Image (cartoon, grey):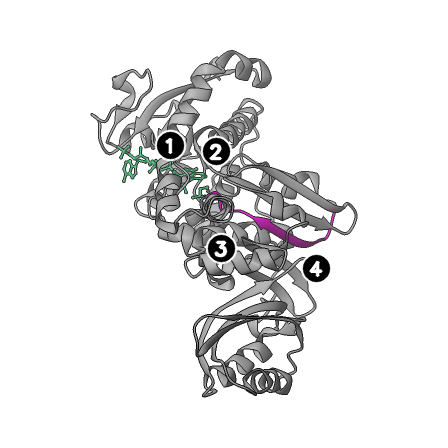
Amino acid sequence: MSDSIQIGLLGLGTVGRGVYRIITGNGENIKRKIGAGLEIKKILVRDLNRDRGIDLDPGKLTTRIEDILEDPEIKIVVEVMGGIEPTLGYVSAALEKGKSVVTANKDMIATCGKQLFALAEANSADLLFEASVAGGIPIIRPLKQCLAANRITQVIGIINGTTNYMLSKMTGEGSDFEDVLREAQAKGYAEADPGSDIEGYDAARKLAILASIAFNSRIVLDDVYVEGITGITATDIAYAGELNYTIKLLAIAKETDEGIEARVHPTLIPVHHPLAAVNDVYNAIFVTGDAVGDTMFYGRGAGEMPTASAVVADIMDAARDLLRNVPGIISCTCYEEKPVKDMGAVESRYYIRLQVSDRPGVLASIAYAFGDKEVSLASVLQKQTDTVTAEIVLVTHKVREKNMREALEIIKHLSSVKEVSNVIRVEGE
Ligand code: NAP
Ligand code: HSE
């Protein structure tokens, strides 16, 4: 083995630039920690002429993947280009050639993880993906290693930096949805297609990865119930505040007697709840294990340097395994097959905002419809919106999702109900 381990970097955008900065800037430290230097030999990009804002030998850049895949000196391929195509093909080819792979790509791991882990195992290569969930926060390695002795019962967290940044600004500063989305994009937090952030799919992919590791059973994107934040209005944020709640996009996975529960949706949580204090681009993840009890992981969930911190730590682990001649030693832990719980069976409390005709008996008819489906009301708030319309905000006690959906179907068709303006789950009491 040469003194320096050669790396092929796929992508030099937000995360790739951070990886380059850490490897070139902290080189001496890294070398002392792993016993060899790291050298980025080639970097795959689309545009050779783009100003990257870093001091870089242009000879390292290439648009030809063969320059990395066909180079036997390159032992570690670092994928930070994103997406599934052509990325999956590149990563598969690297693994087939026995190169270890480090990736930040949750889309690829959440949808094609099974086949990639099989390839890594077959070719004695490492496949590491710490940065794919919660940016700079160590969470994959703690789940796989530090908490390995536990039976994990739940993982609950804020795992999308973009939406947390947006909701924090909308709540704290009254910012407009489109304006804060643009800010999050400018800061490099958002995905290439920010729709996957605001519609909840980025968090859902990350939850699929976390749940698979936590419960040792493969959970894919389709197993996760997903709602994003596009329906959250300034009115809901204000009412939530009035009721002493704040709104967060939560990712929730639990192992229950009816199967694995996996869901991502906006959620009202009490203002005194620890997750309510997680603001801006910060992420936080609660993990409960039968031996350890509650643990919480907190840090920056997106952005150039935090994400690169996790990527480079993975590169260092892969390099250590190469130096010890044990690449591929960290294997997939999805060795069980557990059922996924139907969303209708999930229990939650609910916040419901309705526009109704402001006349006698309306509230009673709504309460009757809820009661008929065994939905019990915890609180009711009523505001006059104009001379003939009132806005009603209800918070329920815990109820099965199926009952709530049936009750709403009836309420929506009551002549006195003009609109069901929003329905948001409530957690954390
Ligand atoms: P980005 O800024 O859009 O950078 C993507 C890079 O990949 C660019 O350098 C681009 O080349 C290159 N690239 C894309 N498609 C390519 C292709 N077909 N062939 C060659 N090069 C290609 O993306 P990013 O924000 O760094 O994210 C990268 C990955 O990290 C994604 O999987 C993302 O989900 C994940 N991630 C991002 C963050 C974050 O905070 N941004 C956090 C955690 C995980 P050009 O520059 O020439 O266009
Ligand atoms: N777009 C993602 C986020 C990047 O906002 O959390 C980190 O995975």
Q: Is 429 above or below relative to 122?
A: below
Ligand 2 contact, mark 3 (Cβ < 8 Å): no
Location of the C terminus by quadrant is bottom right
In magenta segment, residue 185: no
Mark 3 residue type: Ala
**Residue, far right:** 291
Ligand 1 contact, mark 1 (Cβ < 8 Å): yes
**Residue, far front:** 387
Badge 3: few (under 14), some or many (20 or more) residues near its Cα, within 10 Å?
Answer: many
Mark 4 residue type: Glu
Q: Earlier in the sequence, mark 2 or mark 3?
A: 3
Marks 3/4: CA–CA distance = 23 Å
Q: Kindly indicate whether the residue at mark 2 contacts the one at mark 1 (C-beta within 8 angstroms).
A: yes
Residue 14's disc number? 1
- Residue 182 horizontal/vertical position (percent): 34, 43
Residue 429's disc number? 4
Mark 2 residue type: Thr
- Residue 17 horizontal/vertical position (percent): 38, 26
Q: Kindly indicate whether the residue at mark 3 contacts the one at mark 2 (C-beta within 8 angstroms).
A: no
Q: Nearer the viewer, residue 161 or 109?
A: 161
- Residue 356 horizontal/vertical position (percent): 48, 79
**Residue at which label 2 appears:** 307
**Residue at the image position 49 percent from the left and 55 percent from the top:** 204
Q: Kindly indicate whether the residue at mark 1 contacts the one at mark 3 (C-beta within 8 angstroms).
A: no
Q: Which residues are magenta?
A: 150-161
Residue 204's disc number? 3
Secondary structure of residue under mark 2:
helix
Secondary structure of residue under mark 4:
loop
Marks 1/4: CA–CA distance = 38 Å
Q: Earlier in the sequence, mark 1 or mark 2?
A: 1
Ligand 1 falls in quadrant: top left
